[in-house]
Amino acid sequence: MLSFAYPWIALLIPLPLLVWFGLPAHAERRTGLTVPFFDRLVRLSGRQPFSGGVVARRKPASLVVLVVVWLLVIAALARPQWIEPPLHRDLPTRDLLLLVDLSGSMDTRDFVDASGATVDRLTAVKQVLDDFLSRRKGDRVGVVVFGDAPFALVPFTTDLDLCRAMLRDTAVGMAGPRTAFGDAIGLGIGLFARSTVKAKTIIALTDGNDTLSKVPPAEAARVAKDKGIVIHTVAVGDPQAAGEDKLDEAALKEVATTTGGGFFRALDRAGLAQIYQRLDAIETRRIDSVSFRPRRDVYWVPLAAALTLVLLAQAVGTLRRHMRRLPARPAMVTEAGP
């Protein structure tokens, strides 16, 4: 579909007529040739002299060319644009942050994978998260791993394949052997600082007791609530364990309750998969579909047409003048035979 960015330019169409009728004609005074035998020249020429200017009149064809060229120039100034078919783009309206515990206790081999083999907790978590991320089309996802300290593994991105690849490369202990869960929440809050979406969610997975954080998990949760962040906590540890590996379910429940999230306990891989299926249903994907129609400038078309028309008119005029200057060929006389 064709449209004009500056349609008001069409008001300039009658401008040449206003100039023609509103401004006085151009006139020049020139000194004529003075001869003593002017009267004799008048008698010989048979024409009577007159005073006043000579008004040059254009031929109808020239006027038509000028009018068409002017209209084409006005069309180019109005910036014609060809509107392409509409394009639709889905924009994420949720930022989802995964907090993954990489402390030493995640190396405990008490989970069974899909094939029935015994694997460590982190391997089972990575398998479930990989499936979870494969279904999160439309969200921006970030990943924070934590041990002795939290680290932003993947900033918020819509490239979920990158998140899955980076998670597959994680290993137990790469962030330290202990658990700094509260600091991980604090880092997550900082990552949300530049987020412009309304829905902000953290899914935190840990199997240990927070013994190293500078900011207690409960205090970090209150800050997250003030920022409008919902935290779901997933516990994968053994509640019967003691010491560093003991699972602090009370702290995880408090974090989830404070922010309006849910607390989940996973005792095996199947239970962990069911938890993420429930989270997938609770934290539904939110997408805004934005439609826009690309515009392509085609002002060069009327300009090219005007230039072509002017060049053709000049070529025709030059050819006609050249034809007039050619000498007439004498007629050929042939004698008829007897």
Image: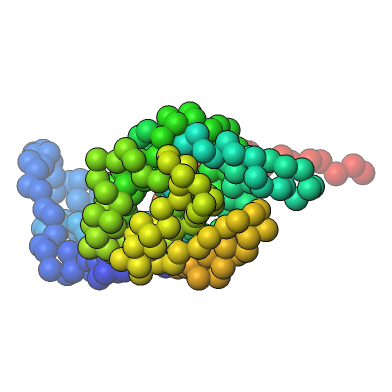
Residue 25 visible: yes
Quick check: 306 left or right of 228? right
Viewer-nearest residue: 95 or 126:
126
Q: x%, y% of residue 230?
A: 36, 63
Tell me which residue sits at (43%, 61%) in the image.
232
Q: x%, y% of residue 57?
A: 29, 60
Q: x%, y% of residue 103?
A: 47, 36
Quick check: 92 left or right of 11? right
Quick check: 330 left or right of 62? right
Q: x%, y% of residue 321?
A: 46, 43
Tell me which residue sits at (51%, 38%) in the image.
105
**Which image quarter: residue 196?**
bottom left
Residue 324 visible: no
Viewer-nearest residue: 53 or 81:
81
Tell me which residue sits at (63%, 60%) in the image.
271
On-image quarter of the C terminus: top right
Viewer-nearest residue: 39 or 254:
254
